[in-house]
Amino acid sequence: MIKLEDVTVIYNNKTIGIKDINLEIKKGEFVGIIGSSGGGKSTLLKTVNLLVKPVKGKVYINGKEITDLDIASLRKVRREMGFVFQDYNLVERASVLNNVLMGRLGYLSSFQSFFNLYKDSDYTLALQALEEVGLEDKIFVRADRLSGGQKQRVAIAKALCQQPKIILADEPVSNLDFKTGEIIMNYFKKINEKQKITIVINLHDVNLALKYCHRIIALSKGQLLFDKKTGEVDDELVQKAYS
Ligand SMILES: Nc1ncnc2c1ncn2[C@@H]1O[C@H](COP(=O)(O)OP(=O)(O)OP(=O)(O)O)[C@@H](O)[C@H]1O
């Protein structure tokens, strides 16, 4: 489903983002990426949907190489990949419903998206996605009136509205307190189990990664430190990841 082959990302011709990464993630996996700050976790996620472009190596989605696709073809690949950000990435002054509907923009023509000409089926999907995260009673509330946890649930609903095969989440609970973070992680778990959506998630909190993810990938200085089933990750490996 996701395959990186010898992938290296370098910023501004000098800073290594990730280096010589090889990995494969299968459909339905729930993968946590851990490691100390600057290790390359965000870069790795952004490379999967080519928000950053490798200087070397190949990226495959569903067996198809996407590294050098033109913008139109890349847009089609990206619309099946939801991206959930640490800072929610919502339009604060727009309603919850309108934010979630934005998940459908990749399926509209330029004309339709300019005038927000959503179809009835887009509204149905948006409402289903909001039900999935328990926010159906907030559809007309403006995003800036919500708590951090609610905003992140809207962001997850927006990703679900894309009908994604993959959800990439970059530190989605870092701005939230522990309890709210657990609530968000439980939504990811439910989505993964119920809808079989592949989830790749960057987490600062290794305990959350060990509790929810099936597989843990650790990065250090842009390189793969280990890639193991969660049950195989012991204290020694965790220490290694953060040393
Ligand atoms: N846009 C950028 N321009 C220049 N260098 C960057 C950029 N983004 C990341 N880097 C550098 O690439 C390396 C990897 O950063 P990245 O953000 O991927 O790590 P991370 O593990 O996600 O870190 P954190 O946990 O602090 O978010 C770091 O040295 C970082 O400074």
Image (cartoon, rainbow, N blue to C red):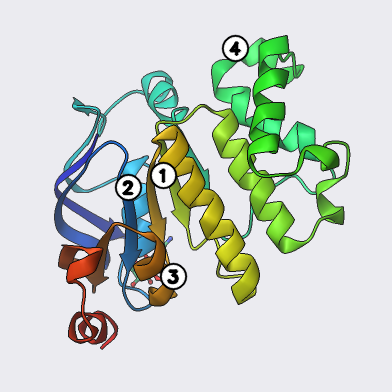
Marks 1 and 3, how far apart at CA: 26 Å
The three-letter amino acid code for the residue at tag 1 is: Leu
Q: Which mark is residue 51?
A: 1
**Which is more N-terminal, label 4 or label 2?**
2
Marks 2 and 3, how far apart at CA: 23 Å
Q: Which residue is mark 4?
A: 109
Q: Which residue is mark 3?
A: 208
Is there CB contact under 8 Å for labels 2 and 4?
Answer: no
Quadrant location of the C terminus in the rendered image: bottom left
**Which is more N-terminal, label 3 or label 4?**
4
Query: Of the residues tagged 2 and 3, which is closer to the observer?
Result: 3
Task: Decide which of 206, 41 is in the foreground and name it.
Answer: 206
The three-letter amino acid code for the residue at tag 3 is: Leu
178 lies above or below 202:
below
Is there CB contact under 8 Å for labels 4 and 1?
Answer: no
Marks 4 and 3, how far apart at CA: 39 Å
Secondary element at image label 1: loop
| Residue drawn at the location 25% of the way across and 79% of the way down | 241
Q: Quadrant of residue 158?
A: top right
> Mark 4 vs ligand 1: CB under 8 Å?
no
Q: Residues within 10 Å of mark 2 (few under 14, many from 20)?
A: many
The three-letter amino acid code for the residue at tag 2 is: Thr
Q: Which residue is mark 2?
A: 47
Marks 2 and 4, how far apart at CA: 26 Å
